[in-house]
Amino acid sequence: MIPYIDEALQRWAEAQASEADCTSNMGNSVIASLMASQGVLNRAARGSRVLVNRVTEIGWILSKHLSPEQRQVVIEQYCSNLPQREKWVACGCSRAQFYRRLGQAHRAIESQLLKRAV
């Protein structure tokens, strides 16, 4: 796995979870976000090197550039609270295949981020 991509995907999953909380409570708007964060504008998560706009790019890449199998593995790995063994079962693959797909997804995301940076 690629450490920077791993961190970016963790931030993406956190954003997905907080967005779900925000939309269930107050709607999806800037005002709702500021209310949820008590007026603090958070441009990056806890000193992370991954900026918020990068999180949006990650979401776009996941939806447009990954195979369904790779997307499923990423979602299970970063958004699910299941034990690892249950994540493999949910994806319908072995442990080795799960991590192979996850590595492929990391490389595909890195490639797309590099293309978009140019």
Image (spheres, rainbow, N blue to C red):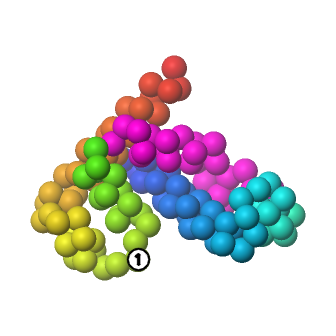
Query: Does residue 83 appear to the left or right of 6 in the view shown?
Result: left
The quadrant in which residue 110 appears is top left
Mark 1 nearby-residue class (10 Å; few <14, some 14–19, many ≥20): few
Identify the residue shown where x is 72% and y is 74%.
25
Query: Does residue 114 appear to the left or right of 53 in the view shown?
Result: left
Identify the residue shown where x is 42% and y is 53%.
6
Query: Does residue 53 appear to the left or right of 109 in the view shown?
Result: right
Give the x, y percent position of residue 53: 63, 42
| Position of 66 relative to 96 (above/below) | above
Q: Please say whether residue 42 is one of the residues in the magenta stretch.
A: yes
Can residue 7 be seen here? no
Compare residues 65 and 118 and report the one nearer the observer: 65
Which residue is denoted by mark 1 in the rendering?
A: 81
Q: Secondary structure at mark 1?
A: loop
| Position of 53 relative to 19 (above/below) | above
Q: Please say whether residue 67 is one of the residues in the magenta stretch.
A: no
Identify the residue shown where x is 41% and y is 39%.
64
Give the x, y percent position of residue 113: 46, 33
Compare residues 12 and 68 and report the one nearer the observer: 68
Give the x, y percent position of residue 38: 84, 69
- In the image, the segment drawn in magenta is 41-66
Identify the residue shown where x is 38% and y is 60%.
75
The quadrant in which residue 99 appears is bottom left
Counting labels gives 1
| Position of 19 relative to 54 (above/below) | below
Give the x, y percent position of residue 117: 53, 26
Taking the view exactly as shown, the residue that stands out farthest to the top is 118
Can residue 79 be seen here? yes
| Position of 60 relative to 31 (above/below) | above
Callout 1 amino acid = Asn
Query: Does residue 97 appear to the left or right of 27 in the view shown?
Result: left
